[in-house]
Image (cartoon, helix red, strand yellow):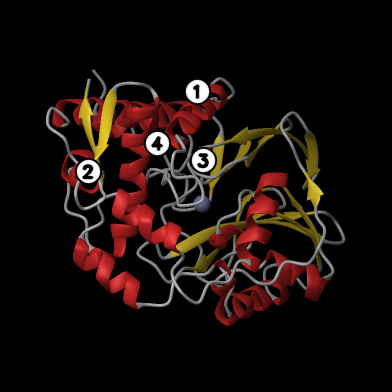
Amino acid sequence: MVSVADVTPRTPWEEPPAMGDAIEVAEGVLWMRLPLPMKLDHVNVYAFDEGDSWTVVDTGMSSNKTRRIWTELMAGPLGGKPVGRVVVTHHHPDHIGNAGWFQSDHGAELVTTRTAWLFARMLTLDVQEEWPQETLAYYRSAGMDPEVYAVRRAERPFNFSDTVYPMPLGFTRVQQGDVFRMGGRDWDVHMGNGHAPEHATFWSRDDNLVLTGDQVLSSISPNIGVYATEPEADPLAEWLEACERLAALARPEHLALGGHKLPFTRLPLRMRQLIDNHHGALERLMEFLDTPKSAAECFPTLFKRSIGPAEYGLALVEAVAHVNHLYQTGQVSRERRADEAWVYQRL
Ligand SMILES: [Zn+2]
């Protein structure tokens, strides 16, 4: 019999590096952190020693504060050597936020996936002073709480350009099946999906390191969300497909370096836990949808805890991902309620 403690992923480090400091997690590989102004209050970034320069993986959300910390890191733990290359795992602002700054101010090369680059550059240029009608319609379709909806509508909409530094033209593409040289190691490139489209993960051929980005995390589950850009999308199917495919590569001794929380071993076990959690959530939803309910009404069943205002947005897009999956796979029907919300019922 194994105890609960024995089946949870293990972390070699109990404490993360302080802001402005680094921990060497393997030879020539530094783990650092940058702050985020959200409930999830940090993002992990990594630097790989290239001899006369560094390759940095992920860059933090754009702000004067994070760029000040980067400047301290470059003068301190990075020893004054230049950042010659920036690798970005996926297009979210906490990962790609300062990539454009490294390109324009430090002459670094940007390496990422084509979808990540296109999405980030498109969204950065798409500045909206008023809420787009499509976004408001999407919130109503999801059954957003009318009070939350009213508060949001009264505020300036979130813009990518608020949290992502302007991205100059040009990048270098990595894609599925590439072998990528970084930090004295060869890495197999495998694409994740579902948390973000075409999310790069890197698997070292020369030691036990894996860069999982946000595709797989140690103690929180990666957010899987539907957005107004593609309201009928089924990102949960994409995330499950990617994780089943990547799980075949995972070994217990791998040291997984993720985008948030602590690095960890026992990667196969963690991936199985995350996959099983989603299947469990889908089963609970099928029970719950014996009568028609909106995505927002599924929160208690889906999350099994109360959702505060700071998490409401992420919870809503994740709830839509789950009902969309049931709908797109033919397990539930849906119809419009008088308040414009889609309500779902099991078939
Ligand atoms: Zn992300």
Which labelled disc corresponds to residue 294? Answer: 2
Quadrant hosting residue 294: top left
With 165 as the anchor, is 83 left or right in this view? Answer: right
Q: CA distance from mark 1 to mark 3?
A: 12 Å
Q: Mark 1, mark 2: which one is toward the viewer?
A: 2
Q: Which residue is mark 1?
A: 244
User: Mark 2: which amino acid?
Assistant: Ser
* Secondary structure under the numbered disc 2 in the rendered image: loop
Q: Which mark is residue 9?
A: 4
Determine whether the beta carbon of the residue marked 1 sits less than 8 angstroms from the nearest atom of ligand 1. no
* CA gap, disc 1 and disc 4: 18 Å
Rounded to the nearest angstrom, the CA distance separating label 2 from label 4 is 35 Å
Badge 3 marks a residue whose secondary structure is loop
First in sequence: mark 3 vs mark 4: 4
> Label 3 crowding class (10 Å Cα cut-off): few <14, some 14-19, many 20+?
many
- Residue 113: x and y in percent read 71, 45
Q: Nearer the viewer, residue 133 or 283?
A: 133
Q: Is residue 210 above or below residue 42?
A: above
Quadrant containing the C terminus is top left
- Amino acid type, callout 4: Pro
Between marks 3 and 2, how big is the CA–CA gap?
27 Å
CA gap between label 1 and label 2 equals 29 Å
N-terminal label among 1 and 3: 3
- Could you tell which of marks 3 and 2 lies nearer the N-terminus? 3
Which is more N-terminal, label 2 or label 1? 1
Q: Residue at x 34, y 72 (%)?
A: 153
Indicate which disc, 2 or 4, sits on the residue closer to the N terminus: 4
- Pointer 3 residue: 215
**Up/down of 336 relative to 168, above or below:** above
Q: Residue at x 38, y 22 (%)?
A: 329
Between marks 3 and 4 in the image, the one whose residue lies nearer the viewer: 3
